[in-house]
Amino acid sequence: MPQGISRRNWFRATSAAAATTAAATATTTPGQRAGQPALQVATNCEMCFWRCGALAQIQNGRVARIEGNPQHPLTQGRLCARGNAGHQTLYDPDRLKRPQLRTGARGEGRFQEISWEQALDWFAARLSDLKSKYGPESVAILPHGVSSGFFSTLMKAYGTPNSAEPAFAQCRGPREVGYALTFGRGVGSPEPLDLANAKAVVLIGSHLGENVFTSQITQFADGLSKGAQLIVVDPRFSTAASKATQWLPIRPGTDIALLLAWMNVILAEGLEDKDYLAKHAHGLDELRAHVKPFTPEWASAETELPAAQIRDTARMMAAAKPAVVLHPGRHVTWYGDDTQRARAMAILTALLGAWGRSGGVLLPTALKRGSFKLPPFPESKRGRADGAGTTYPLASEEQGVTNGIVEATLTAQPYPIKSWIVYGQNVLESIPQRERTLAAIKLLDLFVVVDILPVEQTLYADLILPEATYLERYDAPHIVESAARPFISLRQPAVAPLHDSRPGWWIAKQMAARLGLDAWFPWKNPDEHLSKLIEPMGISLSELKARGAMAFEGRPTIEQRTEADGPLFPTESGKIELSSKTLKELGHDPIPIYHPPADPPPGWFRLLYGRAPVHSFARTENNALLNGLMSENTVWMNDHAARDLGLAPGARIVLQNSDGSESLPVAVQPTAAIRKDCVYMAHGFGQQAPGLHKANARGASDTPLISRVKIDPLMGGTGMRVNFVRVKPEVHT
Amino acid sequence: MARYAMVTDLTRCVGCQACTAACNAEWDVPPGQARTRVLPTGAVGKFPHLRSAFYVAQCNHCDDAPCLSPCPSGATFRAENGIVKIDRNLCIGCGFCVQACPYEARYLNPATKKVDKCDFCSARLERGRQPACVTTCTGHAKYFGDLEDPGSDVYRLVYSGGAQRIESDDVKVGPNVYYAGRRGEPELVAQMFPPRQPQLPSSGQWWSKVVKPLALAMVGATFAGQAIAFFTQLRKGEGQFDE
C-alpha cells in the first residue's frame, strides 16, 4: 500500500475539520456537470464572426459550460478560447441591463434608466422628426454581425441607403474587390481554403494562429502534418512563421514588389499552370510583359529579402501547383493600394492554377433560401452619402464605407448626416482616426447604440439599447456557401434574456411597428422567419434545431461544376482577368504596379497591429475568463532597438505618433521576432470605458495612434499601417 | 489496467489557449490560474534565423511523482490507472506538493484553499468522454489514451511517432505527458522549460502549515463535531478511487 494512502486514513480518522469540509464540498464537482448536462442547446458562437458550432449546456437555468458541436460540418466540435468563454460574457456583471437615456453631456456618462416602451417610443419619434426635417438619408446605420440584417431591413424601409460596416472598409473589402475583379467573385467568408490538402501554403501578412478561426487552424495543422511547404511573409516572426519552411521578414509595405517578382520568376521559368491559363485566363501576354522588369534582384532592394529566397519560394509554390493556398488574408486595409495588392495575390493564384482546385481556393455552392415577399424599399433621390459607387467606384453598396459616413457627417457633404445608429460594433475602436470619429459623433442630433456592454461609445449615446447576448437570442441563421460542403447553422437562445435586455430582431421589429414599416417584417416570431428561410432546403426545422447545423452537397472544384452553378468566372470576359478592363476604364492600373512606401525617420517605428488568439476585436477584453488569460497587450519591439532606447523587458512606455497622439502606458516586449523598423501590438486593448471594470485602461489601443489613413481610391478602405510612432521621451521636471 | 497518457503535437499547436480556456471553464479555475497553460518559448536564435514553440504544460502524472511523498494528509495519490489525483476532501492546502512538482503544474486555489491540478478530466473519462482540452483543441494537437492499448493514438505516437518526455539530466521522474513535433519543438521546449528540482518542505514549514493548524483543529473539535464527521463520512462512503 503506497505511503500516501495510510496517511489519508489517519487524517480522515482524526481530523474533524477535514471531514466537515468533506460534507460541505460533496456537491457536484465542476467537471461532472460537463459529462451529463441537464439540457443542451445547439447554437453557433458569436465570440467572433466564424460562428463555430456550439453546444450550450444548461444547469439550473444557467449556461454552465459551452462546448463545440461535433455535428457542425465546418468546425466539427472545436471551439477556441473565446468560444469556451462565451458564458462569461453572458454573465458579465458589467453588462448593459436596461435602456438608458442620456441626461448629462455627451461623454459624461450620465443616464437615466427607462422602460423599453419609453425607449422605443422616444427613438421612433426622433427618427420621424429627422425624416421630416432632413430626409431619411440623414440617418446612417453602422451595423456588424449576423443580426445586422434586421436593422438593415428596418433602415432601408425607413428610406436611408446609408448603411456601412467596418467589415468592408476596415477589413476585407479590398480582398473581395480585388478577387472579384480577377475571378468574377470575391473570396467570401469563411474563406473556402483547402488548407488540409494544400501542398504549399503562402501567408502574406496573414497571422493565422494568432488569428484563430477554429476550422482554418485545424485544416492548416492537417496540411502541415501532411508535409505542406509553408511560406510566411511577415515583418514579424509570427506563430505561423515559426512553423514555416521559409520565413520572409519583409520590409513593411513592399508586398506588391515581392508578388510581382514571384510572378516574374514563375513566368520567366515557365512554371505557370499552362493548361489552366490557356483554358481560363485572359491577358497573359500583357501580364508577362508587365512583370518582366520585376526580377528578384529588383525586388530584393525594395523588400530587403535575399533575391535567392524570392526565387526559391517562387519555385517552391510552383512545384506544388495547383494545390497551393495563397491565403487572401482578412484584415487587409493597410497601405491604400490594398485592392491592387489583393489583385496581385489573385493573379498569382491564377498563375498557379489554384482557384477552384483541390488544395487551393474552393468555389462556393449556392443554397436556395426562401424569402417573404416584401414591398420594394423606397428609393433615395439623394443617393448614398458615403461615396460607395461614386467617389469609391468599386465599394460594396451592400456593406458601404464607414469612413465615408464619418466624412459626410463632418463635412455635411454631399448632404448632412444627422444620426448614427450603431449595432454590434464599437466605432471608436473599429474605425481608425478616433478623434475624427468622436468629432463626428459630437455633431449628431441623434446617436443610438445597441450593445451588450458599456463600451466607450455608449458614453456618447443619446439612447442605449441593451441587447441580449448570442446565448439569449435568436439570430438570422448562418448560411455558408463558401465551404466544401455548404451549410446552414442555427443561432437559438440557450436561456431567456437576462436583466432587461432584448434580442436584436425584437428591437428592429418593434421599431418597424412604431414607424409604420410592418410590411417589411411579415413574420410573427423567429420560428416563422426561419421556417420560411429553410423552406426550399428540404430540411426539417425540428431536426435543424436539434442538430444545430446541416450540410449540403458541394461542388467546390472546377472539375465538379455543373451548368446549375452558373458561369465559372462571372467576369465581363467570362475568364480570369489577369489584366483588368474594368480598372483600365476607371483610369487605374489594369495590372498592379508597385509604389514604394515611406520609411519611418530615424527613431521612429511603423505601427503594426494584429490579433491575439484569445480576444476578438475590442469585444472580449472584459470577459472574466479571457481577461484572465490576457488582460493587457504589449508592444513588440526589436530587442536591439529596445536596448538602444534603454528599455528593459516590461518597461512601461507611452507611444506617440507623428501627429502627437499618444497611447496609454503599455509594457514593452523586446524580442528578436520583429524587424527594427516597426513595432507591433494586439488590437482591442487600452479601452477608455470606466463601465468595463476588467478592461478599462488596460494596455494600449492602436486607434488613437492611427490618426492618418491612406484611402484606397477604388473601394474607400482605410490603409491603416501608414502611421509612425516613437517611444515618448520621458519628461524630466 | 489502463495507463493513461497525453501527447501534444507541437507542430499542430498554434498556442491559441483553447485548451486553457476549456479547462478553466470545465473546472472553474480562478482567473490567472490554470490546470493547463500554454507557454511560448519566445524567439530563440538570431534574426532572421529564429525558432519558437509553445509548451502546453500540465500535470505529467509522473511514474515517480515527487508530489506524492511530501503530502502530509495523503490527499495526493495515484489511482490505479496512473492518474495522479487530489482528494479535495483531504487536502489541507499546505502547498508542499506545489513546490515539489518539477513541472509547476499545481496551484493553490485561493477560493477553496485547496490545491488543484489536471487530473486528465477524470470526471469526463468516467462518462466516456475525452478531456476537455483534447476535444476543443483547434489544431487537433492533443491526443489522450491508454499506453497499454496498441491501437491508441498515444501508443502509436509514443512508441513509433517520436513523442518525447520533457526531462532534464537531473530530473527524470517518468512523466506520462509526451510531446511530438516535426521541427524539433519538443527539444526546444525541454531546453527552455526544463523541469526543476523538486523542493521538499522544511521543518519550519511542517510546523507552520501542518502540525500547528492540525493541533489547533483537534483541540477545538468537540465530541459532537467528531460524531458528525464520523457519521457524515459513514453515510457518504468511500471515494471511487479509494484503496
Image: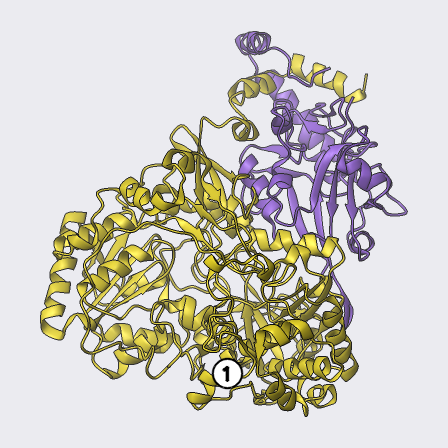
Chain colours: A yellow, B purple
The subunit letter for the residue under badge 1 reads: A
Q: Quadrant of the N terminus of chain A?
A: top right
Residue A645 point in image, percent of width and height: 65, 80
Q: Is residue B14 at all visible to an observer of this figure? A: no
Residue A156 point in image, percent of width and height: 23, 64
Secondary element under disc 1, as helix, strand or loop, is: loop
Q: Which of B218 and A255 is in front in this view?
A: A255
- Residue occupied by mark 1: A580
Residue sitting at the far front: A563
In the displayed structure image, the side of residue B19 where residue A395 appears, left or right: left
Residue A312, compared with residue B99, is above or below; it is below
**At label 1, which amino acid type do we have?**
Ser
Q: Which of B236 and A377 is in front in this view?
A: A377
In the displayed structure image, the side of residue A231 where residue A422 appears, left or right: left
Q: Residue at x 60, y 20 (%)?
A: A18
Q: Nearer the viewer, residue B182 or A666?
A: B182
Residue sitting at the far right: B169
Q: Is residue A18 at all visible to an observer of this figure? A: yes
